[in-house]
Amino acid sequence: MKTRFLLYIALLPVFLSGCGSNNNASDAQGTFEADEVIVSSEVPGKIISLNIDEGSVLKKDSVIGVIDSVPLELQKAQLEASISALHQKTMDVVPQVKLLKDQIAVLKAQLDNAITERNRTARLLKSDAATQQQLDNWNNQVDVLKKQIAVSSQQIQVQETTTGTQNSTVLSEAKPLKKSVAQINDQLKRTFITSPINGTVLTKYAMAGEVTATGKALYKIADLSVITLRAYITDAQLSQLKLGQKVNVLVDSTASTYKTYPGVVYFIADKAEFTPKTIQTKDERANLVYAVKIHIKNDGYLKIGMYGEVQFK
């Protein structure tokens, strides 16, 4: 009995330390994830270059590849040529108007002469040196010349209106053509493959030399500087968490040690769901749990898919 008592006393510190080793007991568990963006081709064509590898760190709006733009440039040149050809289809009304105005000038000169002769004939008629028929002839000639001038003036107006309408109809075709040119200019900009965010290339789907299509995936990228832990809690734990609350996130460092990261709760689901098979909650008997998302500043150690544990503060 004395030997057993001494052995118990000797092992008591071990038992006590074993009972105190639960300092790292977690309140919830989950996996790390990030907002992944799949970058797709916006125009079809041959990939001239795609200067990325999996793991490459990209800056937002940086150009990392080019798609062949020659077909688009040829379409643009064809449209611009069509716009230029429209001006050749228009009519120049100036020569025709000038001709009519010259005719009016001649008619006015003839009218002035006819009025002069008519007035002279009227004076001669008073002295019986001319006949009434001669005066009537000049009066008729004056009336005819006035009508011819009026007709020529009207012809100028008609010609200007008709030509203007025709030219407007022809030139109206330029507007949709210019819109098409603007559309192609926009597509030409999209032949440059850029990064939509600051992040790390996770997967590369295409290679230089391949022919791509609109909407075909080129690569997948995610911002890993701040990573998200999606964990699950029971309804009994809901009262222990609130948005903006700081928590500790534990990640396996070695077989027996953890790395601890500060985290901030930024999402708590308002709807329960069934416990995912890969997740163990504090109360393993719980069937329904609530998802929470925690932001953690990544030092480069945390990877998508790793497991993490959460300790509430």
Image (cartoon, rainbow, N blue to C red):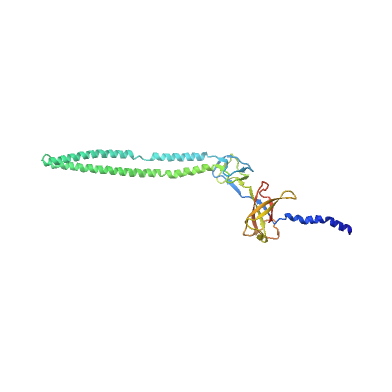
Q: Position of residue 52 (x, y in %)?
A: 61, 41
Q: Nearer the viewer, residue 246 or 69?
A: 246
Give residue 206's quadrant in the image. Answer: top right
In the image, 167: left or right of 65? left
In this view of the protein, can residue 275 be seen by the observer? no
Residue name at image x 78 percent, y 55 percent: 18
Give residue 90's quadrant in the image. Answer: top left
Q: Position of residue 169 (x, y in %)?
A: 38, 45
Name the residue furthest left. Answer: 128
In this view of the protein, can residue 248 be seen by the observer? yes
Q: Position of residue 64 (x, y in %)?
A: 58, 41
Q: Nearer the viewer, residue 168 or 61?
A: 61
Q: Position of residue 229 (x, y in %)?
A: 65, 52
User: Does 20 appear above or below 68?
Assistant: below
Question: Can you say which quadrant of the picture contains the C terminus?
Answer: bottom right
Residue name at image x 18 percent, y 41 percent: 138
In the image, 237: left or right of 177? right
Question: Can you say which quadrant of the picture contains the N terminus?
Answer: bottom right
In the image, 53: left or right of 157? right
Residue name at image x 76 percent, y 55 percent: 21
Q: How many marks?
A: 0
In the image, 291: left or right of 126? right
Name the residue furthest bottom. Answer: 236
User: Does 244 appear above or below 131?
Assistant: below
